[in-house]
Amino acid sequence: MADWTDAEKSTISAVWGKVDINEVGPLALGRVLIVYPWTQRYFGSFGDVSTAAAIMGNPKVAAHGRVVCGALDKAVKNMGNILATYKSLSETHANKLFVDPDNFRVLADVLTIVIAAKFGAAFTPEIQATWQKFMKVVVAAMSSRYF
Amino acid sequence: MSLTAKDKSVVKAFWGKISGKADVVGAEALGRMLTAYPQTKTYFSEWADLSPGSAPVKKHGSTIMGAIGNAVGVIDDLVGGLSALSDLHAFKLRVDPGNFKILSHNILVTLAIHFPADFTPEVHIAVDKFLAALSAALADKYR
């Protein structure tokens, strides 16, 4: 789907290697539900999401944040093949979960912000550029089975 | 998505905290945008150096952030307060308004980097809404 230089591949591995999914996943999903409250439509069974505090303290949100971020691992380990890697996950989101694919871009942007907050100045403009390219490809692959 | 009284007070309080570093944030956000979204470079073809930290990027980042700071001051009437800037962007600069969202995202990334403790989810939603309202006001005169 996209071409990756060796430098880009190692940048993505290096960034991902420093991300603790158990910490970042819940932070990212929680922030999506707070900043874009209409996304709560997909989580009716998760219990109390009525306030920011409730969302950040909700164990189901945290667990699901870990699942969603954990799935990014597949893309990091298969950068040459991201389209194929997410084919069935894309189909599931389109045909079973009925998730608006615009949400993939929303999550990607919030995840970038959460990672930037963690890394600080170490998340240089150049590293951000490579990370955003990776996010763009992941979002395109996750959107690819929506017809 | 109009700004509530709470949004406005959160934005004003946060801007008070960051105002000392506004120039740095503006320069960095612009540099990040030009690096991570290279299509935005087309609007700055007359600059010799588009790299983060270059003189024109620093200067222009500071100009932009100053204007955003002024917008905080007119937060109750962004369309009126930004009318002249909207004319500029609509008729002289002719920047595609889609790019306002891109710059806004890079401002949020830069704020998260420089103020990780203060850029809470509550501040994030208020600032995101404010930048969206500002972008709409900036695009107001386009057609």
Image: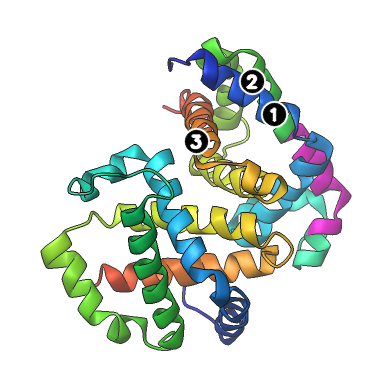
Instruction: Quadrant for residue B68, please give it.
Output: bottom left
- Residue A69, picture quadrant: top right
Marks 3, 1: nearer the viewer: 3
Between A37 and A79, the residue placed more toward the observer is A79
| Earlier-in-chain disc, 1 versus 2 | 1
| Label 3 – label 2 distance at C-alpha | 18 Å
Residue type, numbered disc 2: Val
Crowd tier of the residue under label 2, counting other residues whose Cα lies within 10 Å: few below 14, some 14–19, many 20 or above: many
Q: Which residue is mark 2?
A: A76
Percent coordinates x, y for residue A36 in the rendering: 59, 58
The residue closer to the viewer here, A30 or B28, is B28
Q: Nearer the viewer, mark 1 or mark 2?
A: 1
**Which residue corresponds to the image point at 78% horizontal and 49% vertical from the top-left?**
A45
Instruction: Name the residue beneath numbered marker 1.
Output: A16
Q: Chain of mark 1?
A: A
When the figure is inspected, residue B46 is found, relative to residue A137, above or below; the finding is below
Q: Which mark is residue A126?
A: 3
Please indicate whether residue A67 sits to the left or right of residue B112 in the image.
right
Please check the rendered image and state whether residue A57 is part of the magenta-colored stretch, yes or no.
yes
Give the extent of the magenta segment: A56-68
**Is A96 displayed left or right of B107 in the figure?**
right
